[in-house]
């Protein structure tokens, strides 16, 4: 009886939230997006509740709830799946079974989750990587880097760089029969941030220059200087993510100090000496006219925060902060942006800057799309958008890798 009442209560709250969550008009599958947004909001609310009651930290509650989506490394008729590690950093390999004379391409996969959540074990990612391995006859290596707040910046990045460099060794590539000239780095959301940074670091390192053939960035966040880009304002209440939720989680990658997220919400978190960096993220300069709409550019408010977080001016946190000469050397790039996504403009600005310096970019803009679609491709709620994006990405790899 108690259990049934609890379930009924939960569904009533979910239903109420769904009705209440506004979603943009021209969105695809609005009821599914409402349901996903509601589940995320309720989870976040439960997290805050548990934290305030002193039971468990906000992010631990979300992690615990997401464990139900975790998969074991299960091989199938086409692909051998193995969990192993490179110097204690867990990696999952997807190795095609089909015999082939040719060497294979490879994809290094970096999952999303705001640097705080997520794993390659999540069923949507497992499906994606399995399909990539099968369709492309590619070796896929997925990384479970260390997560914040237990391991703040730059732990996640260090792990991704380490695994990538380790994999790129001649003897490792030979072991998996990988063609060294056909390697792509891919990541979604904060995984896209990490993928962009790993690619920049390797391209600007004489020992690794030219080793990465392509990068694929799915709706990435690319800077933390300006939290008021037009898309941050338009989609501050969702769908899927809210600005408050995202700022709260992302700040944990820098610090657990509550002063930072509070300042970032007001967009008053950058230090005085960061003024010269704003030219790299100036939406008034880099956004196509269509997205500027009636937004008015305001100059940054600096020096309001007494605490100092040097990370905030580090291009390894905000890949948009590198100068044009460092961008110039970047490889073939695939970027997905979604119209109804708080991170839309981060992607659009990066595309403008990359194209300005002559980097070849394939831009997939999804008019009816929302953030995170690739992680909603399995039960209980899956989006057709996620399946479509997955197919488009794999097609692009087939043609370009
Ligand atoms: C194995 O590959 C074939 C051909 O691509 C496909 O039809 C089949 O569904 C795959 N099996 C699994 C378990 O994915
Ligand atoms: C941003 O761009 C606008 C218009 O191009 C310009 O007026 C403004 O000074 C720029 N601000 C910064 C900080 O780069
Ligand atoms: C920042 O420091 C100044 C001078 O030390 C002090 O007057 C001000 O109250 C501090 N502001 C905050 C928000 O702590
Ligand atoms: C770009 O940044 C790099 C690294 O910070 C620096 O060495 C280089 O001089 C800069 N180039 C220009 C044109 O500013």
Image (cartoon, rainbow, N blue to C red):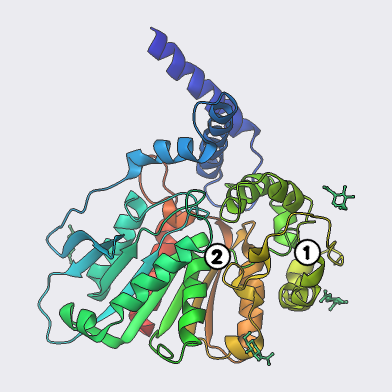
**Image quadrant where one finds the C terminus:** bottom left
Q: Mark 1 points at which residue?
A: 271
Pick the front one: 34 or 356:
356
Q: Residues within 10 Å of mark 1 (few under 14, many from 20)?
A: many
What quarter of the picture does the N terminus occupy? top left
Query: Disc 2 designates what residue?
Result: 220
- On screen, residue 55 versus residue 80, left or right, reads right
Q: Does residue 300 appear left or right of residue 382 in this picture? A: right
Residue 294 position within the rendered picture, expressed as x and y whole percent measured from the top left: 84, 63
Which of the 4 quarters of the picture holds residue 17?
Answer: top right
Task: Work out whether residue 317 can be spotted.
Answer: yes
Q: How crowded is mark 2: few (under 14 residues within 10 Å), some or many (20 or more)?
A: many
**Image spot of residue 60 (x, y percent):** 46, 38
Alpha carbon of mark 2 to alpha carbon of mark 1: how far?
24 Å
Where residue 115 appears, as percent x and y from the top left, is: 50, 55
Residue at the image position 54 percent from the left and 44 percent from the top: 33
């Amino acid at each position: 009886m108690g259990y049934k009442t609890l379930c009924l209560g939960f569904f009533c709250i979910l239903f109420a939230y769904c009705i209440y969550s506004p979603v943009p008009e021209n969105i695809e599958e609005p009821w599914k997006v409402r349901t996903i947004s509601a589940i995320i909001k309720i989870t976040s609310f439960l997290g805050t509740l548990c934290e305030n009651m002193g039971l468990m930290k906000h992010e631990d509650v979300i992690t615990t709830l997401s464990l139900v989506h975790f998969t074991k490394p299960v091989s199938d008729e086409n692909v051998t799946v193995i969990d192993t590690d490179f110097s204690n950093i867990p990696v999952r390999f997807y190795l095609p079974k089909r015999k082939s004379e040719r060497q294979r391409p490879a994809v290094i996969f970096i999952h999303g989750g705001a640097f705080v959540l997520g794993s390659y074990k999540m069923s949507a990612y497992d499906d994606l990587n399995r399909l990539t391995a099968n369709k492309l006859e590619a070796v896929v290596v997925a990384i479970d880097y260390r997560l914040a707040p237990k391991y703040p910046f730059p732990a996640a990045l260090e792990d991704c760089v380490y695994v990538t460099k380790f994999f790129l060794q001649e003897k490792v590539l030979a072991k998996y029969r990988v063609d060294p000239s056909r390697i792509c780095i891919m990541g979604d959301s904060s995984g896209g941030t990490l993928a962009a940074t790993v690619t920049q670091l390797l391209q600007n390192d004489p020992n690794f220059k030219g080793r990465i053939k392509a990068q694929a960035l799915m709706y990435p966040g690319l800077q933390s200087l300006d939290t008021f880009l037009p898309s941050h304002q338009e989609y501050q209440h969702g769908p899927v993510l809210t600005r408050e939720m995202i700022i709260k989680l992302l700040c944990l990658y820098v610090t657990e100090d509550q002063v930072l997220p509070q300042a970032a919400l007001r967009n008053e978190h950058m230090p005085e000496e960061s003024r010269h960096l704003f030219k790299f993220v100036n939406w008034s300069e880099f956004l196509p006219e269509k997205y500027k709409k009636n937004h008015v550019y305001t100059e940054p408010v600096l020096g309001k925060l007494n605490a100092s977080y040097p990370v905030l001016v580090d291009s390894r946190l905000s890949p948009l902060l590198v100068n044009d000469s460092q961008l110039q050397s970047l490889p073939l790039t695939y970027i997905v942006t979604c119209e109804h996504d708080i991170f839309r403009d981060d992607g659009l600005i990066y595309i403008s800057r990359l194209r300005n310096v002559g980097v070849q970019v394939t831009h997939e803009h999804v008019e009816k799309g929302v953030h995170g679609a690739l992680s909603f491709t399995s039960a209980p709620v899956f989006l057709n958008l996620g399946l479509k994006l997955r197919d488009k990405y794999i097609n692009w790899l087939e043609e370009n890798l």
